[in-house]
Image (tube, helix red, strand yellow):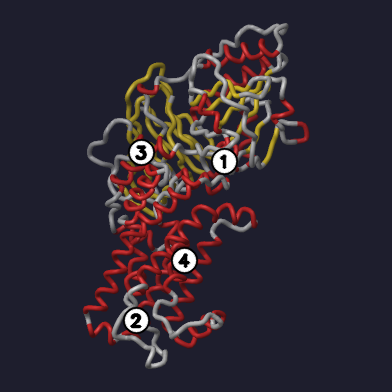
Amino acid sequence: MLTLALIGLIGGLVTGISPCILPVLPVIFLSSAQGARVGAPAAANLPEKPSRARPYLVIAGLVVSFTLVTLFGSLLLSLLGLPQDVLRWAGLTVLALIGIGLIVPRFEHLLEKPFAWIPQRSPDANRGGFPLGLALGAVYVPCAGPVLAAITVAGSTGRIGAGTVVLTATFAVGAATPLLAFALAGRRVTERLRSFRKRQRGVRITAGVVMLALAAGLVLNLPQLLQRVIPDYTSGLQDKVDNSEQVKEALNLGGLANEQNKNLDRCTAGATELESCGTAPDLKGIQQWFNTPGDSPVDLRRLRGKVLLLDFWAYSCINCQRSIPHVVAWDRAYRDAGLRVIGVHAPEYAFEKEPGNVESAAAKFGIRYPVALDNSLATWTNYRNRYWPAHYLIDARGTVRHIKFGEGDYDVTERMIRDLLTDADPGTRLPAATGTADDTPVTADITRETYLGSTKRVNFAGGGTYTAGDRSFRLPGRQAADTFALAGDWRLTSQHITPTGEGGRIRLNYRAKEVRMVLSGSGTVTYRVAGQRRTIRVAGTPDSYQLLSTQDTKAGSVTVTVSPGVRAYSFTFG
């Protein structure tokens, strides 16, 4: 628990000093510099002294709002059938109303009328501090950097334990700490400067204007322009925190334990012998099924007596694409002997949540076994999964006997399938082993999968800010191995990138036998291989397109020119 608290605090502090906080700083400063409300009775009006508690109330409201929205916002909105940005719009609305109230006292009186029943000794300069913090927290959530994956998964599935709450709360406190320092500075300025104290009416009007400007700017995504001007000076530090092995291990992404999955720890991932890891957890939160009679759901309890293989996959994942032929072959070879395969499709990208895309991909891969769409990652979390692909082998009594993360060792998995089928029915006659070729590359010899979206990007070697928004890039003079760089004008989103003008280029230095790109939209990708110009025509939903293939793994460099209208998601390697 202490480790989670430290990780949350450090991650929050890094976020709290990043450029994403800059738009809210003027509001924090001016709101903390206010004294009593102008228009209050003279005896109660305290223009000479700013509120000592107000900075703490503003930041406390921000911490509470950030924590609640991050943990419970997505789940609540999903239950109510509301769009995921409702809370942000609510925060912007409250921010705008407070801004108008600061400028127009009569409007502020109207806002306060519903709360007139609350007894007060006198008009209080602290009033409004906490609600303002709540509003800022709602609009600050999207700006707070990449929300920790462990918190996001827990919040979206509703499986929130004490560790998740600690992680989220400490992250919020860490992110708010620099803001509190700025708020206290605002109060200190008011205390020191008598002229500032005498002009509280002007301070309130200025604060109101700034709040309205912030609300309008957030609606129009103007903070992106600010991020283009100011480099992301915390990106290196953020990467060190997010990619630390200790952090990954402590967060155990997708690994929140519960009564159903607590015994999965008894299995050693990739073991060479069968183990016993407790009863298989339920398949939860499945949005849709196909390849079942009438697309009806599958109940694991009704499969007792059969050997079951759960395959967690995502259709654009190159690792999954190399694994699927083995799973398909096992399904065909051993179905009559009592094997049942279920493909749990857990999306990496938003486009992979579209049922039609998944069904089309499954047909292309020759998948005939049942497929469950786990769009909310509820089953993923219930199995404490962390990888694409992942195989969970379950015996005829419903006990998990083997867990395999990632590619490879297919001969071991098939041997275990055969052993469990024989245990379930000693008299069964099994066919010969499938013998499907293992095309798993030696990971040390190839470049790792390279995502291009702003929140998942790895291996970026170019200069400039790689965050969501419109960006301009130039290729570096020197580029390291296993990296990519951009040239031209691009629009970066959390999932993909697309050129906003002609001549958007990506230079990739790689080590692999095969290089592919995940693309969608409409347009072309052109490049040269061995002196020959090649063109890929892109049309429709996201798919994986081959750029080049060689007989042996080797290092190389390729520069692709992407036309406007094409969305590029990632490079994958074989």
Residue 149: give x, y in percent of width and height. 46, 44
Q: Does residue 76 appear in the picture of this structure?
A: yes
Q: CA distance from mark 2 to mark 1?
A: 48 Å
For discs 3 and 2, the disc positioned in front in the rendered view: 2
Question: Residue 196's image quarter?
Answer: bottom left
- What's the residue type where badge 2 is placed? Gly
* Residue sitting farthest toward the bottom: 42
Q: CA distance from mark 4 to mark 2?
A: 20 Å
Q: Earlier in the sequence, mark 4 or mark 2?
A: 2
Q: Which dot, 3 or 4, sits closer to the camera?
A: 4
**Secondary element at tag 3:** loop
Secondary structure at numbered mark 4 = helix
Q: Residue 377's mark?
A: 1
Dot 1 alpha-carbon crowd within 10 angstroms: few under 14, some 14 to 19, many 20 or more:
many
Q: Callout 2 environment at 10 Å: few (<14), some (14 to 19), or many (20+)?
A: many
Residue topped by disc 4: 134
The residue at 32%/68% (across/down) is 183
- Height in image: 77 above or below 457? below
Amino acid type assigned to the residue bearing label 4 in the image? Leu
Q: Which residue is mark 3?
A: 243
Image quarter of the N terminus: top left
Q: Identify which residue, 382 or 435, lies in the foreground.
A: 382
Q: Which residue is mark 2?
A: 35
Mark whose residue sits in front, 2 or 1: 2
Question: In the displayed structure, does residue 87 sit left or right of residue 178?
Answer: right
What type is the residue that disc 3 sits on? Asn
Compared with residue 490, is residue 338 higher up or lower down, i.e. above or below?
above
**Circle 4: is it few (<14), some (14-19), or many (20+) Cα within 10 Å?**
many
